[in-house]
Image: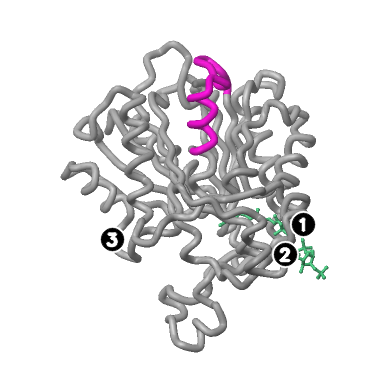
Amino acid sequence: MPVDQTPKSRIVGTGAYVPERVLSNLDLEKMVDTSDQWIRERTGIRERRIAREGEATSDMALVAAQRALDAAGLQPKDLDMIVVGTITPDMPMPSCAAFLQRKLGITDIPAFDVSAACAGFLYALSIGDQFIRSGMHRHVLVVGAELLSRILDWEERTTCVLFGDGAGAAVLAPANGDGRGVLSTKLHTDATLIESLCIRAGGSQERITPESIRQKRDKVFMNGQDIFKVAVKNLTRASACALTEAGIGASDVRWVVPHQANMRIISQVAQRLDIPLERFVLNIDRYGNTSSASIPIALDEAVRDGRIQPNDTVLMCALGGGISWASALIRL
Ligand code: ACO
C-alpha cells in the first residue's frame, strides 16, 4: 500500500540557546596535550560553549523553548505535550522535560525525555509528529538539550575537545494542507556497537564508586574510529532512504541540517549523497558537537538568518550512542 506523504504536522516555530562562555581550541591547548590545528583538521571545530556553574539543562531548554514559542506566536499554555531529547537531564529522575514544564509555568500535560544520544531531537520530533498525526495533540514542544561539559573527562583529549553545551527547540502544530510539514521520519537503533560510545558507571549496571570515579568510568567513553565509520555509512543510508520513500531526488533537497559531530563525517556524507556542501547548514566550528541540541540549533540559525525559506525541503540526519540514528524530511 502506498505511504500517505501528506504532511500532518508542521514546525511553526524554532528557537535556540547557547551559553555565553566560549572555550576555544587555544584554551584547550592549555588543558590537554592537543593543538588548535589537530582539532580543526580532524573535526572542523574552532570553539564550543560551556554552561556556567549552576546552569542546568532545563535552563538552557527553557530559553530555546520560549524563543520557539515566540516564533510560533504561542503561549506555554497552548502546549499539549513536551518531549525532550537529552542524555544529560538535570537529575537522573525526574525528566528534564518535567523541570522544563515547571519552568514554563504550566501543569498537567505529558512531559518526558527520550534517550537516543545525538539522535534525540529527531526521535523527539518523530514522537511529536505521531501524536499530531493521530489527532491526539495539537501543539507539541520538541527539544534537544545537552550539558555535555558535565559528563566529560577534561583530561581525556580524545573526547573533551569534541563536545559543547546548548539547546534547541521546535513547536509542532497540525499542518494546514498546503504541502508544508513533516514529510517523513525514520528511526533506527543497532546495539552491536553499544560499548563504543557510552558512560559505563552511574546506571543500574555499575554504580559510581571512588574506584569508578578514579577510572573516569562515570564520564563519556568513545571509540571514535568505530563511530566514524558507522556514522558515514548509516547517515548516508538513512538519508537516501528518506529521499527514496518520499519520491524526492537529492537535487530537490534545498538544505541538509546534519548532526554536527565531525566535519569530515559531514563531507563524506555530502559526497555520497551527491549534495554539495554549500547546501549543508554548518555551525560545528562555533559550537562543536552538542549532541541532541545540534540539529535544532543549526535549524534555528538557518531559519532566523533567512537561509531556509518557507517551502524549502530540508533533510535532517543524526547518529549517536546506541548506536541510534535517524533521518527526517520536512518542507518548512
Ligand atoms: N589532540 C591531539 N591528538 C589527538 C587528539 C587530540 N584532541 N585526540 C586523539 N589524538 C591522537 C590519537 O591519540 C592518535 O595518536 P596516535 O596515532 O599516536 O595513536 C591520533 O591523534 C589519531 O587518532 P584517531 O582516533 O585515529 O583520530 P581520528 O582521525 O579518528 O579522529 C575523532 C578522532 C575526531 C574522535 C573521530 O574519530 C570522530 O569524529 N569520530 C566520530 C565521533 C562521533 O561522530 N560521535 C557520535 C556522536 S557523539 C554522541 O552520541 C554523544
Secondary structure found at label 1: helix
Query: Looking at mark 2, is its residue's CB closer than 8 Å to ligand 1?
Result: yes
Residue 198 spot, x, y in % from top left: 56, 67
CA–CA distance between discs 1 and 2? 7 Å
Q: Nearer the viewer, mark 1 or mark 3?
A: 1
Q: Residue furthest top?
A: 178
Identify the residue at image location x=31%, y=42%: 82
- Residue 41: x and y in percent read 78, 50
> What residue appears at the point 50 percent right and 38 percent down from the top-left corner?
297
The residue that mark 3 highlights is: 94
Q: What's drawn in magenta, residue-wise?
A: 297-313
Circle 3 — which element?
A: loop
Tell me whether the residue at label 1 lies in contact with that at label 2, contact meaning CB atoms closer than 8 angstroms: yes
Amino acid type shown at disc 3 = Pro
Identified at 71% across, 27% down, the residue is 278
Can you identify the residue that label 1 sits on? Answer: 38
Distance CA(mark 2)–CA(mark 3): 37 Å
Looking at the picture, does residue 27 appear above or below residue 206? above
Measured Cα–Cα span from mark 1 to mark 3: 39 Å
Mark 2 secondary-structure assignment: loop
Q: Residues within 10 Å of mark 2 (few under 14, many from 20)?
A: some
Q: Is residue 189 visible?
A: no
Name the residue type under label 2. Thr
Q: Residues within 10 Å of mark 3 (few under 14, many from 20)?
A: few
